[in-house]
Image (cartoon, helix red, strand yellow):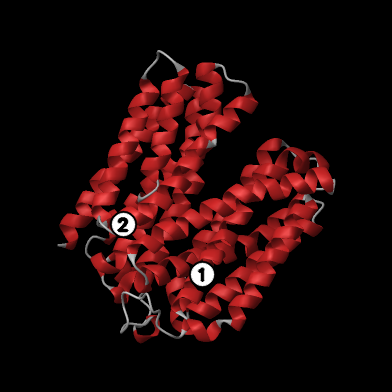
Amino acid sequence: MGSLLLALIYICFISLGLPDSLLGSAWPVLHTEINVPISYAGIISMTIFAGTILSSLFSDKLLHKFGAGKVTAVSVIMTAFGLFGFFISNQFWMLLVWSIPYGLGAGGVDAILNNYVALHYKPQHMSWLHCMWGIGASVSPYIMSFSLVQLESWNYGYLIVSVIQAALSLIIFISLPLWTNDSTDSVNKTDTETEVKAMSFEEIFAIKGAIPCFWMFFCYCSMELTTSLWASTYLVQKWEFTPEAAAGYASMFYIGITLGRFFNGFLAMKLGDHMLIRTGIAMITLGIVLLFIPFHSLFTLIGFIIIGLGCAPIYPCIIHMTPDVFGKDKSQAMIGIQMAFAYTGFLVMPPLFGVIAEYISIFLLPVYMLVFLFLVFVMHELVIKKAK
């Protein structure tokens, strides 16, 4: 039963990644059809992130009231509902309205499932779980491409993913009895989420080492999404790649993350979370150093791949270490706030670099990344020190 539930959780994370690339893939056509500026994609993205932050903040209270299985099932159906709304939308304001349930649902799934796996499964599964997200995020552009080419509409791409999400939600509802049983692969067979009361925000922020942990998540996610968003532009402006070639090469960053998380699952069996985080930071540092080398674009391309490989263990390891560092009774409260800080980093810092790129220089991208990486390192060491 435990293996069956774990397989279902993996599928949930593939589905969590599926919608993430749809907007970017559809937007070149979508924004012309609804007659809005190309920059309006950022407004939709911000609305989705706002919903995700909100649901992450309240995930602890929802978990203790309804349980992991029910919250996950309802969150997935909310995401499906939001995506269906995109399918029937033909005006910008409609996309904004449907972005709200989409974002709320995505945040609930992310926070609840991350905590469930951190509590109940061995560390390798956390890396593989986030590898599944990468698979979903990699597949969705092909779904949208099929919709645009074969079905001649961006709307049907959202409908396809909405149907997948709705079917998954039905499966989760059917499987609810599994969520109440301890996994056969569980690393914690005595604690359950419902045995501990939900914590207030004041109590959460008062936990020793919590604040540097939250800022570690903020800084890491700021660095990751800034790299993803601006790598193509960096290649075009520094090395004069064509936009098409730059987009292809920049995708190697996420390929590095996805492959890295697959192999990190095996490394997690031997190494602890803290060692993997430090190793990831060292690899990212090496990759950023390669971006500074001016002699040939090959160093930059290799640098982005190495940065992706270095990023691979950090996000899942921060989550997985949470029950061990802060206590299993506090893990959902901590992870909910971690997700909120993560999505705030996604929301704020990549656009801030856009301002820097426009008014100063795109060539500051490696410096920007290095600043956040240094802060990740400092915050991680503070967490270890404060939690002892």
227 or 258, which is in the foreground?
258
Q: Residue furthest top?
A: 295
Q: Residue 276 location in percent, x, y?
A: 28, 50
Q: Residue 183 location in percent, x, y?
A: 40, 79
Name the residue beneath numbered marker 1. 7
Are circles 1 and 2 on residues that touch, CB within 8 Å? no
For residue 268, the mark is 2
In-image side of 17 versus 297 (left or right): right
Residue at x 76%, y 41% (from the top left corner): 31
Q: How many marks?
A: 2
Q: Is residue 101 visible?
A: yes
User: Upstream in the sequence, badge 1 or badge 2?
Assistant: 1
Q: Amino acid at mark 1?
A: Ala
In-image side of 214 versus 91 (left or right): left
In-image side of 290 versus 102 (left or right): left
Q: Residue 258 location in percent, x, y?
A: 47, 47
Q: Quadrant of residue 198?
A: bottom left
Callout 1 crowding tier (Cα within 10 Å): few <14, some 14–19, many ≥20: few
Residue at x 35%, y 72% (from the top left corner): 119
For residue 301, the mark is none
Callout 2 crowding tier (Cα within 10 Å): few <14, some 14–19, many ≥20: many
133 or 348, which is in the foreground?
133
